[in-house]
Image: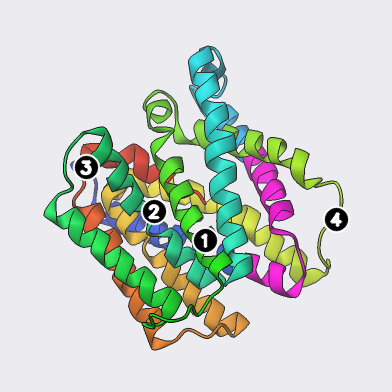
Amino acid sequence: MSGVTDRQIIHGFIKALLAAIFWGISGTCAQFLFEQRNMDPAWLVSWRMMIAGSILVTFAIARKNSDVWKVWLKPHDGIQLLLFAILGMVAVQFTYFYSISLSNAATATVIQYIGPVFVVGFYAIKNRRWPSVLEYTALIMALTGTFLLVTHGSFSELVISEAAVFWGILSAIALAFYTIQPVQLLKKYSAATVTGWGMLIGGLSFSLYTSPWESSGVWDMGTWAAFTYIILFGTVISFSIFLGSLNYIGAQTASLLCSVEPLSAALVAVAWLGVTFTGMDWLGTFIILITVGLLTLSKKPKRGVTTDQKSKII
């Protein structure tokens, strides 16, 4: 990228990697809250979105030449933002966290990473073209990796529950929708504005179902630490530093580096929570990550900025 120094490129790499690690650890913190503190996933999703959304909207307002209010001046854009908040943000957050509660952070995160395959399928149908050889290869690898992850190579049984597989795949589909739907909004408004409003509105609307005013789980120092981490490091800070990395290394490279997320989730889950990750699990994980790499490298840079920005805020 012209005008960018080697030092800035290094800073960009570090920011993108830190964002991915923060997201991975956030999923493991959620698993800790679900398994050891009996917290309801829907309750956590509501508070995560409401608090993080409020912080992001406040940051967006404080920015120079802020566009945080402009999105509401055009009815069509406002409606699209509401759809993104409810059908995109709420869906991707809840399906992901619920999938964690049914399995573990590592497995849920890896399964969600097949989402880009659904994005490829959507654009193939929309543009009325057959996927390329590279995209077909990625599809086969994604299916193979997922098969190994949920069956360990057996054709007769699953190693995680059917519900965990179902919600994990729903999470990947929700991620695809969440990536595609706001593309037009992101051409007009900043990612901070779209994401901040999406989280805040999504959290407020979801709270009608979750009753967040009623406490959930067992609260102690560990609960507060994990909850605070998810809000600050797993959402606000990770989002900010990821966007900061785009200025130096571009969305394509930053998105590829974010493949570290499921690896960090797996390593922390194994070391902290004692999750058993077998050789088949690791093999399935690496195959899916190779899939993400193939799809990322196949993108044209001009197409990748907006979709990659949005696909990482989970």
45 magenta-colored: yes
Work out how far the residue at label 1 is from the one at label 3, CA to CA, in angstroms.
33 Å
N-terminal of the pair, mark 2 or mark 4, is 2
Q: Within 10 angstroms of label 1, few (less than 14), some, or many (20 or more) residues?
A: few
The residue that mark 2 highlights is 115
Asked if disc 2 and disc 4 are in contact, CB closer than 8 Å, the reply is: no
Q: Which image quadrant is residue 145 in?
A: bottom left
Disc count in the image? Answer: 4
The residue that mark 1 highlights is 166
Work out how far the residue at label 1 is from the one at label 4, CA to CA, in angstroms.
28 Å
| Residue 243: x %, y % from top left | 42, 45
Q: Which image quadrant is residue 61 in?
A: top right
N-terminal of the pair, mark 4 or mark 3, is 4
N-terminal of the pair, mark 2 or mark 3, is 2
Q: Amino acid at mark 1?
A: Phe
Q: Of helix, strand and loop, which one carries label 4? A: loop
Q: Within 10 angstroms of label 4, few (less than 14), some, or many (20 or more) residues?
A: few
Asked if disc 1 and disc 3 are in contact, CB closer than 8 Å, the reply is: no
Q: Within 10 angstroms of label 3, few (less than 14), some, or many (20 or more) residues?
A: few
| Residue 307: x %, y % from top left | 36, 41
133 magenta-colored: no
Q: Is residue 203 left or right of residue 145?
A: right
Seen in the picture, residue 246 relative to 30 is either above or below; the reply is above
Q: Is residue 80 left or right of residue 128?
A: right
Asked if disc 1 and disc 4 are in contact, CB closer than 8 Å, the reply is: no
